[in-house]
Image: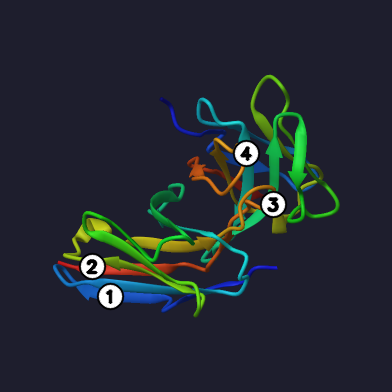
């Protein structure tokens, strides 16, 4: 089955700096890669996703890149703000009847004011 | 348009009791997924359902756990004879489905504590 690994496990940045979170996946049939943000006591919130037919997607301060050959994808957050502090999860899915998400273990991002 | 609704938000059960967790998907969504999250860990897939059908239950423990998504009403995750190891946050997600990989939106979860 699919295996998603996420690293580093914690990341601390100064407010205004950029943060990059990387994930690798093992199943070459995976074609959908979402990123979720989870705040304490809340459910995961979908913040951006990418499909295997594109290499990059951007939404304001957030961008995601995908390298299908190397089987890794990354979340980029620019101009970080304290409210970006949360746990971020990457996930992968094949779609269709196999549309379950396989999650990485998450990374705790801390943005220092 | 209300999001995914889960209830109760917190549930305390004694060992051996039954736990029933409910999930109402977003309006227009016919696909429901259940995930379990242990402290300091990621989310683990349990089961994928469409109305009246279980599509994938490869993540469900073989005993004590069951799930349904009836034609009318919410999806139910049922845990019989709970044990301390069942203590976790249980999240439901819904998607519109209709083939392919589509966005899944999560509820706020039910935090089950077994005492």
Q: Secondary structure at mark 4?
A: strand
Residue hosting label 4: B32
Task: Write the residue at 83% across / 47% down.
Answer: B64
For mark 3, what is the residue? B46
Q: Which residue is mark 1?
A: A12
Instruction: Give the number of the mark in front: 3 or 1.
Output: 3
* Circles 4 and 1 on the same subunit: no
**For the residues bearing labels 4 and 2, Cβ distance under 8 angstroms:** no
> How busy is the neighbourhood of tag 1: few (under 14 within 10 Å), some, or many (20 plus)?
few
In the image shown, does B33 or A10 lie closer to the viewer? B33
Quarter-wise, where is residue B86 in the image?
A: bottom right
Residue A102 spot, x, y in % from top left: 59, 61
Q: Is the C-beta separation of discs 4 and 1 under 8 Å?
A: no
Residue found at the very far top of the displayed protein: B72
For the residues bearing labels 1 and 2, Cβ distance under 8 angstroms: yes
CB of mark 3 within 8 Å of CB of mark 1?
no
| Gap between marks 3 and 4 measured at Cα | 11 Å
Task: Using the image, name the chain to which the residue with label 4 belongs.
Answer: B
SS state under label 1: strand
């Amino acid at each position: 089955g699919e295996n998603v690994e996420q690293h580093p496990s914690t990341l601390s940045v100064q407010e205004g700096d950029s943060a990059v979170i990387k994930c690798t996946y093992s199943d070459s049939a995976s074609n959908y890669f979402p990123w979720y943000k989870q705040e304490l006591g809340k459910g995961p919130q979908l913040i951006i996703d990418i499909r295997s037919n594109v290499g990059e997607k951007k939404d304001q301060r957030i961008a995601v890149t995908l390298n299908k050959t190397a089987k890794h994808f990354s979340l980029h957050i620019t101009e970080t703000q304290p409210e970006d502090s949360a746990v971020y999860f990457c996930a992968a899915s094949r779609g269709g009847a196999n549309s379950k998400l396989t999650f990485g273990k998450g990374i705790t991002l801390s943005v220092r004011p | 348009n209300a999001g995914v609704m889960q209830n109760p938000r917190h549930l305390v059960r004694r060992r051996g009791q039954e736990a029933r967790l409910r999930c109402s998907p977003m309006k227009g969504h016919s696909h429901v997924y259940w995930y379990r999250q242990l402290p300091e860990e990621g989310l683990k897939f349990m089961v994928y359902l469409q109305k009246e059908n279980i599509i994938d239950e490869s993540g469900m423990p073989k005993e004590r756990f069951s799930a349904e998504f009836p034609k009318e009403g919410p999806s139910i995750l049922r845990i019989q004879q709970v044990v301390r190891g069942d203590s976790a946050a249980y999240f439901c997600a819904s998607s519109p489905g209709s083939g392919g990989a589509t966005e899944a939106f999560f509820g706020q979860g039910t935090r089950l504590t077994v005492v």
